[in-house]
Image (tube, rainbow, N blue to C red):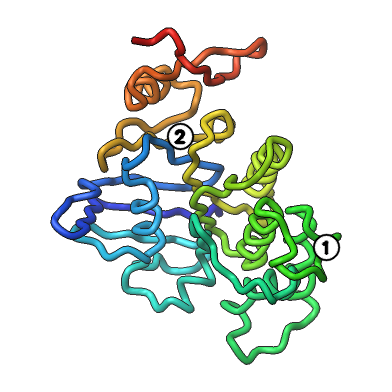
Amino acid sequence: MNPTLQALGVGVRLGRRDVLHAVSLGIGGGWTALVGPNGAGKSTLLRALAGLQPLAAGQVFLNPGAAAQPLDLHRTAPADRARVLAWLAQQGEVTGELTVRETVELGRIARLGLLGTPVAADRKAVDRAMTLTESLPWQHRRLHELSGGERQRVLLARVMATEAPMLLLDEPTTHLDAPHQVALARLFRRLTHDRSAPRAVLSVLHDLPIALQADRLLVLDAGTLQADGPPTDPAVQAALVRVFGGAIRIESDAQGRPRVALALDAT
C-alpha cells in the first residue's frame, strides 16, 4: 500500500500575515510537483505538511501504509515522524568536514538512534542511496570539496537513505545541471513506481519543465490551491498560465506531452 498524506483545512499565519488559506489535499502514490510563483506559499505548505510549521488552522495526517495507524504529524514525536517522512530543506545545511558517506549515514539516525550501531542493512541503504544519486564514486571526499550540485546530490542521498515511505523535497533540483535534473526526474518515477517498496514524492519545484514530468501538479498562488491534477489536464495548464501572469504558455511535443515555453510576445 502506498503512503498517504492528508491535509484538512490547513492555514498558516506568519506574523500578522495569513500565508496559507484553508488548504486541503491528499498525497498518495506517485510523484507530485508543487508549483507556483514566488511568494505563493509553497515552502510554507511543504513545511506544514512535514509537521515542521505550526498551524493556525487544520490538521495533517500521514498513513504510512500496511498495518500502521495514521499519524497526526503535528502531534507526533520528531523521532517517530522521521521514520515515516523524510524532509529536504531548500537550503540544507551540514558541516563541510563530514565525508559524503558520513553525511548520507545521517539519514539512518531515525532508525538507529544517536547511539545505534549500523548493521549490514544500514550500510546497504546508504550504498543504494549514493548509487541512485550518482555520488558513490566520491564517497570519501569531504563536503567542502564538492561543487554545489554535488552537495545537493549528497543531501538527496541522505534523504533517500532514510527509506521513509514519504519524501518531501523543497527545491531538490537546486544547483543541478540539466542532465542531473533529468536524472532526478527519472529517479522520482523509479522510486514511486517500485512495487516492492513504493514511495510517495512531493517536491516543490521552480523548474517547470521538470515539474511537467511529474504524475501530478499542485498549483499554488497567494496561499490558495488553484489547481490539482495531471500535467495534461487543460484546467491545470490554464491555472499555470494564469498564476504566472501569462508569462508562459503550455505546448505539446511530438508525443503529445506538455512542455513549457516563455511567452515572449505577451504584453
The residue positioned 44% from the left and 47% from the top of the image is: 27
Residue 213 located left or right of residue 170: right
Q: Where is residue 78 shown, x and y percent of the image?
A: 43, 76
- Number of dots carrying numbers: 2
Residue 261 located left or right of residue 240: right
Residue 205's disc number: none
User: Helix, strand, or loop for circle 1?
Assistant: helix
- Give the farthest residue toward the right: 137
Work out whether residue 109 or residue 229 is closer to the camera in this orientation and state it: 109
Q: Quadrant of the N terminus?
A: bottom right
Look at the numbered discs 1 and 2 and tell me whether their residues touch, using CB distance below 8 Å. Answer: no
- Give the farthest residue toward the top: 265
Q: Where is residue 220 shown, x and y percent of the image?
A: 34, 37
Give the amino acid type for the residue marked by disc 1 in the picture.
Trp
Q: Where is residue 254 shown, x and y percent of the image?
A: 66, 10
Q: CA distance from mark 1 to mark 2?
A: 34 Å
Work out whether residue 41 or residue 128 is closer to the camera in this orientation and state it: 41
Q: Nearer the viewer, mark 1 or mark 2?
A: 1
Q: Residues within 10 Å of mark 2 (few under 14, many from 20)?
A: many
Q: Quadrant of residue 142?
A: bottom right
Give the amino acid type for the residue marked by disc 2 in the picture.
Leu
Q: Where is residue 127 shown, x and y percent of the image?
A: 79, 66
Q: Residues within 10 Å of mark 1 (few under 14, many from 20)?
A: some
Residue 107 located left or right of residue 90: right
Residue that mark 1 sits on: 138
Instruction: Return the disc, 1 or 2, that comes first in the chain's sequence.
Output: 1
The residue positioned 58% from the left and 64% from the top of the image is: 164
Residue that mark 2 sits on: 217
The residue positioned 62% from the left and 92% from the top of the image is: 115
Q: Quadrant of residue 94?
A: bottom right
